[in-house]
Image (cartoon, rainbow, N blue to C red):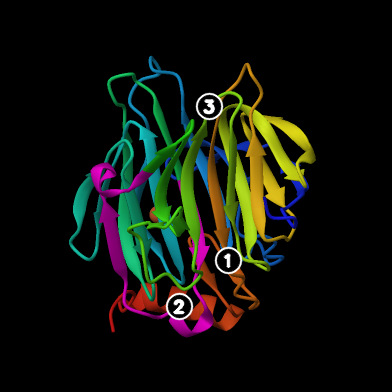
Amino acid sequence: MANNSRKIKEIIDPQYAIEGAGVLLRRSFGPSRENLFDPFLLFDHFAFDKPTEGPPTGFPNHPHRGIETVTYMIEGNVRHRDSLGNSDVIGPGDIQWMTSGRGIMHEEMPKRGPSGIIDGFQLWVNLPAAQKMTDPRYQGVLSENIPTVEDDGVKVKIIAGEYSGVQGPVTEIAAKPLYMDISVSPEKEFSVPIPQGHNAVAYVFEGEGKFGIVDGDGGQNVPAINMVIYEDGDSIFVQTGKDHSVRFMLIAGAQIKEDIVPYGPFVMNTEAEIRQTFLDLQSGTFGQL
Ligand code: FE
């Protein structure tokens, strides 16, 4: 084990929030000028956990500029349509990594799966100033094309970044992110290197495990549902006890270190750029060259 593995800086208890047309979700953090999780701006967990509640609401047509939105589904689906002409369904285990660049309009409508539950995550990744007005781009990857490494009770689905020599399918992202869905069986260990200086968080959504172990001891038992915020270091180390497995999303990336001005679905670097975004929406040039 690396001797500079990361300690826990803070544990966040995700709070319920309502977004879109009345979507109930658990928000760990949202965009703010403090930019504490640079390059990450937001992490939401859809919370349609009452199968008998009727049809879910969604996110009707809305714009984005200056960010990337990343949707990963555990159960249920999200139907997606956008101004680039993409139209598809993000199903269990699928990922959609959308780079809004200078502008995209899209609609995200959750649908219940056979269990009636919709379980999924949306992550927002910041774009550096030099790429905020880039061409919009869309990387949709089906579950079967996302590599999974399974070894000694540890299962790692690699969306972005590298684990055990295997590279995730989402590439060419400015923040060089690591994004993985990790399951650890009882009485097992997991570790992965994370470059020093990158911000790292773990969203624990099933079971429980010990996080923030350094030099083989210490650490803290973290049950679902909580987000672990890590201090700096060169790796993370997780261990499970004999009664519990744990499942979590591990998210890490290089800090962009630029001032940000968030406003709803837009994240730019200055207030003038936010004003320009509204002017572009009014004049109908939003999303065009
Ligand atoms: Fe959106």
Q: Please give left or right for residue 176 compared with residue 102 in the image.
A: right
Residue 143 lies, in percent from the top left, at 28, 43
- The answer to whether residue 75 is above or below residue 264 is above
Find the distance from the CA under tag 1 to the CA under tag 2: 13 Å
Circle 2: element type: loop
**How many C-alpha atoms fall within 10 Å of the one at disc 1: few (<14), some, or many (≥20)?**
many
Q: In this figure, which residue is indicated by the disc labeled 2?
A: 132
What segment carries the magenta color? Answer: 122-148
Which residue is pictured at 70% across the width and 39% down the height? 211
The type of residue carrying mark 1 is: Pro
Q: Please give left or right for residue 87 compared with residue 258 in the image.
A: left
Q: Nearer the viewer, residue 71 or 193?
A: 193
The type of residue carrying mark 3 is: Ser
Find the distance from the CA under tag 3 to the CA under tag 1: 30 Å
- Give the image quarter of residue 204: top right
- The answer to whether residue 199 is above or below residue 236 is below
Callout in the foreground (3, 1):
3
**Which disc, if any, is residue 185?**
3
Which residue is pictured at 48% across the width and 33% down the height? 152
Q: Is residue 170 visible?
A: yes
**Sequence order check, earlier mark of 3 and 1:** 1
**Sequence order check, earlier mark of 3 and 2:** 2
Q: In this figure, which residue is indicated by the disc labeled 1?
A: 39
Circle 1: element type: loop
